[in-house]
Amino acid sequence: MNDTQLQASQPQASASRPLRAAQPSPTLSGRRVLLGVTGSIAAYKACILVRLLVRAGAEVTVAMTEAACRFVTPLTFRTLSRRPVALDAFAEPESWTPEHVSLADWCDVLVVAPCTADAAAKFASGLAGDLLSSTFLACRKPKLLAPAMNDGMWDNPATQDNFATLRRRGVCIVEPDTGDLACGTSGRGRMPEPEIVLAAATALLAK
């Protein structure tokens, strides 16, 4: 094969059809997602979820609990979302509306991923002791939880009752995965993969 034949056999980029990786379509364009992050080692998956949401066209605001900040810094989420991170219910709001109320009104969907057993217990009991639980209680928009915890905590009747209560109230629960857990055991309780949470949030917004 001569040089001319070799060049002809290779794929050629052109102005009309450049060679590049396919980009996902912006399925959430214009939608506002409030992502609650609680204190779990699975918080690193929330970073991936933010990137997927932004890539899908969503405007994302992250609300973190104090415990979540021990696993991932607010700066990480601020960089990925390109928006301020909500941390304090008593922070000065942009308007006169209290922070938890303004966030609840701002979003189209509230996603909590990872959602710990502690957070689920607060949500089910209607407690409002921090920014995220207050926002959850005030929010009238669709809600989605992605549990993440030890398998013993997930199997505990108290935890199951809490999630059953939330389901009855219309909260969407993405079932946890089974596999290796951070505590060194294997079982059910892993946070679902970010792609699964994204698909669930997209489907919830489409209803």
Image (spheres, rainbow, N blue to C red):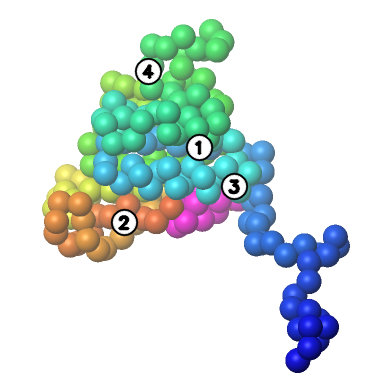
User: In the rendered image of this protein, does residue 184 appear above or below residue 205?
Assistant: below
Query: What span is colored magenta in the figure?
Result: 195-206
Q: Earlier in the sequence, mark 2 or mark 4?
A: 4
Which label sits in the foreground, 1 or 2?
1
**Residue under label 3:** 55
Left or right placement of residue 15 versus residue 108 in this view: right
Amino acid on which the number 2 mark rests in the picture: Pro
User: In the rendered image of this protein, does residue 94 appear above or below residue 119?
Assistant: above
Question: Percent position (x, y) of residue 55?
Answer: 59, 47
Q: Earlier in the sequence, mark 1 or mark 2?
A: 1
Marks 4/1: CA–CA distance: 20 Å
Quadrant of the snapshot with the N terminus: bottom right
Q: Earlier in the sequence, mark 1 or mark 3?
A: 3
Amino acid on which the number 3 mark rests in the picture: Arg
Left or right placement of residue 25 versus residue 191 in this view: right
Marks 3/2: CA–CA distance: 24 Å
What is the secondary structure assignment of the residue under circle 1? helix
**Residue under label 2:** 176
Residue 113 seen in the figure: yes
**Residue under label 1:** 80
Q: Quadrant of residue 37?
A: top left
Viewer-proximal residue, 3 or 70?
3
> Which residue is at a point 63% across and 44% down the rendered structure image?
57
Question: Percent position (x, y) of residue 140?
Answer: 49, 32
Question: Percent position (x, y) of residue 145?
Answer: 38, 45
Counting other residues with Cα less than 10 Å from the Cα at mark 4, is it few (<14), some (14-19), or many (20 or more)? Answer: some
> Which residue is at a point 23% across and 48% down the rendered structure image?
149
Q: Quadrant of residue 74?
A: top left
Residue sitting at the far front: 2
